Image (cartoon, rainbow, N blue to C red):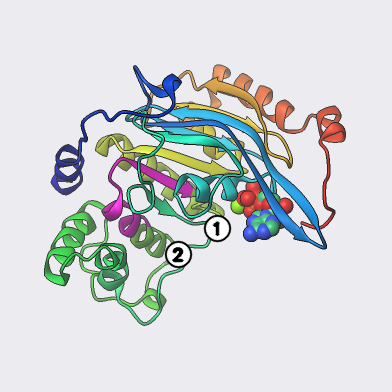
Amino acid sequence: MANLSAMRQSEQRPERETSAEHFRGSAPLLAVRDVSKRYASGQGQTLLALDGISLHVAQGEFVALVGPSGCGKSTLLSIIAGLEDATSGAIALHGDAQAPRLGHVGYMPQRDLLLPWRDALGNATAGLRVQGVARAEAEARARALFADFGLSGFERAYPAALSGGMRQRVAFARTALVTRDLMLLDEPFGALDALTRAALQRWLGQTLARLGTTCLLVTHDVDEALALADRIYALSPRPGRVRLERRVPLPRPRTHADLAHPEIAALKAELLSALLDETALADAPREGGAR
Ligand code: ADP
Ligand code: MG
């Protein structure tokens, strides 16, 4: 982990002037202000995927965004990663709305498949290699992380020879190696069986807490958010809007037993009722028809 913390320290940028006055001052690591996204959905019609999303993530914080399928979670992460533009609104890193995000935040997309023809080390170093890091250096950094990620001895194994949980840890390693300030995770446990998922959630919670990595996770799973996050935003069905923001009243990392804590159970009930609110469902505008 020396790698990641060294990277983080060497990349602390001085405060820069920003065009948006309200981003100045005690700026969080990530601020999303009033972001909307409208897609063209064919035949002159449009589809509003996100509607006025505002949220923030502080340095070292783990924030989860929970919302139903199709509410725009993946769209929002890909905008924050710099892969897509918002239709309106602003996104600032360290208070700087002009700061480049592409290549500066680590992004693990929803379907983060490993390349079957590359071994574990080759897959883990793929992001660094794209950034122009020499093979020997990329492999040295990945090997150090492999020890920490329980992957030592599997450097030369191909994805087909790894368990689902190990493949996912290789994908996390690839993301962690290119993460400077912020790690974005899009439903990272979706394709795993329930036990592997639970084990990997616990591992990720411990690992990120130890590394101090700032993380924004999106999920449709309230339990996952409660297991991992310091703070949770609940989103409405499409178009995604922030419906509720709550702090999880227990320190991280958490155990499975923590989730039975009465305060967590009460928070779960509150989040679920916000997510399942039928009246709000009924008045969410549906535009453009097709998904
Ligand atoms: P989630 O990740 O919450 O399931 P998505 O962000 O994938 O939701 O999608 C939100 C909505 O935006 C969906 O209705 C989806 O069909 C639509 N959408 C996503 N990407 C595109 C695109 N490139 N063009 C048009 N519509 C899109
Ligand atoms: Mg998605």
In percent of the image, x 20 and y 35: which residue is there? 12
Q: Quadrant of residue 216?
A: top left
Magenta-drawn segment? 172-185
At numbered mark 1, what does the secondary structure look like: helix, strand or loop? Answer: loop
According to the image, label 1 marks what residue? 193
Q: Is residue 254 visible?
A: no
Q: Is residue 71 visible?
A: yes
In percent of the image, x 56 and y 29: which residue is there? 54
Q: Is residue 40 magenta?
A: no
Instruction: Give left or right: position of 235 versus 128.
Output: right
- Report whether the residue tagged 2 is closer than 8 Å to ligand 2: no
Instruction: Spot the residue most to the bottom.
Output: 117
Q: Are marks 2 and 1 in contact (CB under 8 Å)?
A: yes
Question: Residue 76 placed where, x, y %?
Answer: 56, 44
Which of the numbered marks, if any, corresponds to residue 164?
2
Q: Amino acid at mark 2?
A: Gly
At numbered mark 2, what does the secondary structure look like: helix, strand or loop? Answer: helix
The C terminus - image quarter: bottom right
Question: Residue 210 placed where, x, y %?
Answer: 26, 36
Question: Residue 86 placed where, x, y %?
Answer: 57, 44
Crowd around label 2: few <14 · some 14–19 · many ≥20 (10 Å): some
Per the model, the C-alpha gap separating discs 2 and 1 is: 9 Å
In percent of the image, x 63 and y 19: which residue is there? 266
Of 99 and 145, the residue lying toward us: 99
Which of the numbered marks, if any, corresponds to residue 31?
none
For marks 2 and 1 on the same chain, the one whose residue lies earlier in the sequence: 2
Q: Is residue 175 magenta?
A: yes
